[in-house]
Amino acid sequence: MQQILEQFQDQVRTAAAGKAALRIRGGGSKDWYGQRLDGEVLDTRPYAGIVDYEPTELVITARCGTPLAEIEAVLAERRQMLAFEPPHFAHFGGGGATLGGTIAAGLSGPRRASSGALRDFVLGAKLLDGKGDVLTFGGQVMKNVAGYDVSRLLAGSLGTLGLLLEVSVKVLPLAYREATLRFEMNEVDAIRKLNEWGGQPLPISASCWVDGVLALRLSGARAAVDAAIRSLGTAHGGHIMPDCAAFWASLREQRHAFFDGDAPLWRLSVPSTCGAIVLGGPQLIEWGGAQRWLRAAGDAATAERIRATVKACGGHATLFRGGDKSVGVFQPLAPAVAKIHERLKAGFDPSNIFNPGRMY
Amino acid sequence: MIPAIPVDPERRRQVASALRAVLPERCVLHDPEDTRPYECDGLAAYRQLPMIVTLPDNEEQVLAILKVCRELKVPIVPRGAGTGLSGGAQPLADGVVISTARLNRILRVEPYARTAVVQPGVRNLAISEAAAPFGLYYAPDPSSQIACTIGGNVAENSGGVHCLKYGLTVHNVLRVRVCTMEGDVIELGGDGLDSPGLDLLAVFIGSEGMLGIVTEVTVKLVPKPALAQVIMASFDDVVTGGNAVASVIAAGIIPAGLEMMDRTSSRMVEPFVKAGYDLDAAAILLCEADGTALEVAEEIERMTEVLQQAGASAIAVSQNEAERLRFWSGRKNAFPAAGRISADYYCMDGTIPRKHLAHVLSRIEEMQDTYGLRCANVFHAGDGNMHPLIMFDANKPGELQRAEDFGAAILALCVEVGGTITGEHGVGVEKIDSMCVQFGANELEAFFTVKRAFDPAMLLNPNKAVPTLQRCAEMGKMRVSGGVLPFADLPRF
């Protein structure tokens, strides 16, 4: 591994000397995500392997190139999981997702609203910076306030601050019981119910509304799940959904029929309490109302309309997949926030070699 | 301890008059009689009279103070309730303190959205009290929660005894509104679950007041569990106790609280709180379940079984709320109890991977002989955060130095086994030299990159938390002492 690390360092130093862009790439499962791909590929996959896994410490540490599937399999053997349920997106033309790419993309799955985001579970990271130096932040412990929390800053940074070499992630036990209820419900009622239920001590671990049907996943102690099935099922006409694991996986991986076809896919991140957002085009609602997927055009006029509407609700919109990227994949930043981004980028990557333009 | 630096009266006149030109008279304190209460935070051994203290009423005034300080190049120290234990709010002789005491309004509690929007000077517990009528509460509960403010919690990324299950401040704050040293007002995070760009909210939380002045915070509220019950288990040796903690986690249980005390601690607190602790046990474990009555019953049963199999010599389950609080009382009062049996004490805050607990505890026991001082150990067992309490008497020649050396050795040991020098109290001025043990030159330089991105003039809370390379080269030693703490009656950690 030391040899591979040295190759990475050489590649980075050479790129820095020539101010040439490097495109950090794991499995390439999310090549389509983000603003722009530029530069010579730095393939992280050779730097792979689980460095440490202590189930009783609730922490796993692995190198960036480790396949996400391998990590999940190892955790599952000990009845544990990555609670942020990251998507693999293996069927969009790339290879299998890696841990490094997963952390850099920062995407969380169905459990986000109840268990937390990917960044919430990042405990530590080793980073190869723009000078070719290896930096270590955070650690393998859950409570650590020594120095700024740079490891969490790296989550979702799309590889723009450096090459993630190794990451330590908090893991959680699988629930003792899991079940999914299915309700016939319109969009407005579903949003209202999700917010009301969110304020009650119910073991809700995921939600999805699409096409007049609300699916609600319950996870936790047997007694808690059974009691919730009884109370919600009776009061709101919910029925147990068979084969629910496949349903939630199809949602996470965007293999659900909603995601079929070539129409551009928008991701709207809004306050969960936002009522129905009328934008034309079908929507799928997750995260208790806080994440809404929209199929709509990806042209400049549509983008402007979507962004203005979503901003007025207190949220932001991402042109997640497809469409015309020249409209800006990510919502523009306030100038004072953009200034801080530029300084961070210049500090970690002075020669501007890492994934330039991937984020903004 | 660093000798206090005298305030330059001429400079004070100049800065005070500039501040009075933009602020109401009552918002600017400069008479030493008025500024004396601000000379230290919870780290009472370090006292420094600030040049000036400001108490802004609103964000506009915060911006006005920042502008004056920017123009006159005056460093700023933000301050909440001043309960911090690492000197993060320690004033500067040539600096202005910005106190959030008057920014103390709860702006909105929104039960439907399960959020509260508050000003930084609102006390942690006041948020939960305001949310209680809706069956909601703010989860992070640092033991000083009756006094500490949400602004201070954001600065320190505060935890609490329930953070294993409910997370730290970083997991429970959705948005902060911040005035930067450059005079910009920025919002990090938002009312949704994420925001575009880099996750600046994550790096801002726990930044010890060095990146900006918070003027508003949106926190997440969660449903209050209907019931909590705690198991008190005794163990004949700490290794068995430590392994029992691992067994609980391995069984797929995340307890609401999971705490351990060694015999020195339980014997120290029992006369004080009369909790009914098993004084023969080498270690006592407190293991809490919360949720609905059915959920708690199921979890308590499962935990009891695991603890028995793990070799607990005795097990008691709280039968009512009064008993639950009594079981917890000793754990929460270890700090004041140490003050009763020892003239001075030094509280450490390292975190270790839990598997090294037995090794670390036995090394600490050996160190007691090496340094000739007693050390009691209380331990957030679920997340590996240790609070060794070193007891000494500063009036006895050499004891202070030995306590400091003992403390530094414990922190170095925490780093050696893969842990950290501070789990929740922050670096501040107290542990700034131990940062040199944990981080190398490249990491420290990266921290300064973060600092400069928010505050290029380096005027916000300078010389705290992140040591310069030069300082690391000079490496000094520091300590907590005094016997009398401010807020001595507050439960701690």
Image: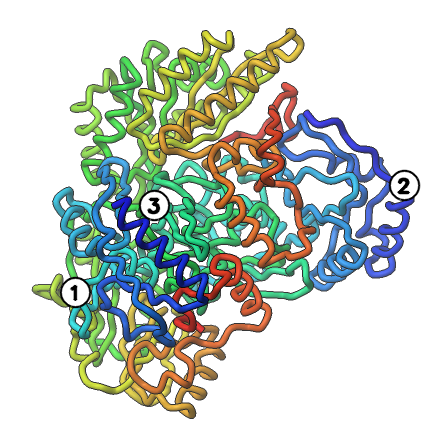
Question: What amino acid does circle 3 point to?
Answer: Ala
**Mark 3 and mark 2, same subunit?**
yes
Q: Quadrant of residue A292?
A: bottom left
Query: How would you rate the neighbour count of disc 3 (Cα within 10 Å): few for under 14, some for 14-19, many for 20 or more?
Result: few
Q: Residue at x 38, y 82 (%)?
A: A277
Please tell me whether mark 3 sits on a helix, a strand or a loop: loop
Q: Residue at x 34, y 43 (%)?
A: B165
Visible in this render: residue B85?
no
Q: Chain of mark 3?
A: B
Location of mark 2 (residue): B9
**Mark 3 and mark 1, same subunit?**
no
The mark tally for this picture is 3
Q: Earlier in the sequence, mark 3 or mark 2?
A: 2
Whole-percent x, y for residue A160 in the image: 41, 64
Location of mark 1 (residue): A249
Q: Residue at x 31, y 47 (%)?
A: A169
**Mark 2 and mark 1, same subunit?**
no
Task: Tell me, for residue B226, which label it has, or none.
Answer: 3
Task: Tell me, for residue B166, which label it has, or none.
Answer: none
Q: Chain of mark 1?
A: A
Please tell me whether mark 1 sits on a helix, a strand or a loop: helix
